[in-house]
Amino acid sequence: METTQPEGRSARKRQAILEAATTVFLNKGYPGTSMDEVAALASVSKQTVYKNFTDKQRLFTEIIHGGLDRIDELFSDVTGSLAATEDLDKDLAALARQFVIILTQPRLLQLRRLVIAEADRFPELGRTYYERGPERVHTLLAESFGRLAERKLLTLDDPALAANHLTWLITSIPVNKVMFCGSGEQFTRAELDHYADEAVRVFLAAYRPASA
């Protein structure tokens, strides 16, 4: 018991630092973030911040990787059961509606904007974000589309390209608008559902077998 309490306090301090750093990085960007401000917001000493994360670059990397873990968790849940569907129209529409809601979450859009802004400074981090974010989602969808093609529910030669087509049909309007116009740009649930439903309609018009 004597060792678990200090370890628990250390874990809580580390989490507080990560949460504070996320807030500061997302609001001020990498150049505008100081370790002093992170420490103050986390209610810890600057020495504690450096003890846990060495420097600002290491802390920034931890923030991005934490966001990627959350993205992977969200999209794995969304795409997991599609390949076994018994009602493609219904389940693909449900997936699309969940997909657009996830991708228009303010925190996720802020993270995306931050990574893009710092891609020249941290190209490997930008590449990691792409591979574990958009490319990972496309891989999950492509696997499902490949199995749906085997079941004759879709007709396609390139599941990965089809996955890209669907995600851009779903998200291009709301995500691009928010990325350029800022997080103050809001969409109603009805608008997001409409984008998702129309994306599925166009996608199935292109990829559904002619006899279906």
Image (cartoon, rainbow, N blue to C red):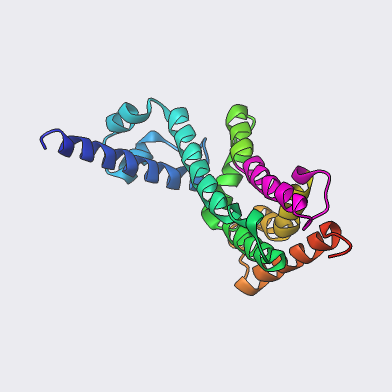
Q: Main secondary structure of the magenta part?
A: helix
Viewer-closest of 211 and 59: 211
Quadrant for residue 178, please give it.
Answer: bottom right
Range of magenta residues: 133-160
* Residue at 47% across, 34% down: 60
* Residue at 57% across, 56% down: 78
Horizontal and vertical percent position of residue 31: 52, 35
Horizontal and vertical percent position of residue 35: 38, 34
Quadrant for residue 95, please give it.
Answer: bottom right
Examine the rendering and report whether any part of residue 205 can be seen. Answer: yes
Viewer-closest of 66 and 197: 197
Tell me the quarter of the image containing the N terminus. Answer: top left
Horizontal and vertical percent position of residue 148: 73, 53
Tell which residue pokes out farthest to the front in this image.
Answer: 151
Viewer-closest of 140 and 164: 140
- Left or right of 121? Residue 11 is left
Horizontal and vertical percent position of residue 195: 71, 66
Tell me the quarter of the image containing the C terminus. Answer: bottom right
Examine the rendering and report whether any part of residue 32 can be seen. Answer: no
The reply to whether the magenta stretch includes residue 197 is no
The reply to whether the magenta stretch includes residue 143 is yes
Tell which residue pokes out farthest to the right in this image.
Answer: 210
- Left or right of 169? Residue 108 is left
In the image, residue 189 above or below residue 180: below
In the image, residue 109 above or below residue 56: below
* Residue at 78% across, 66% down: 201
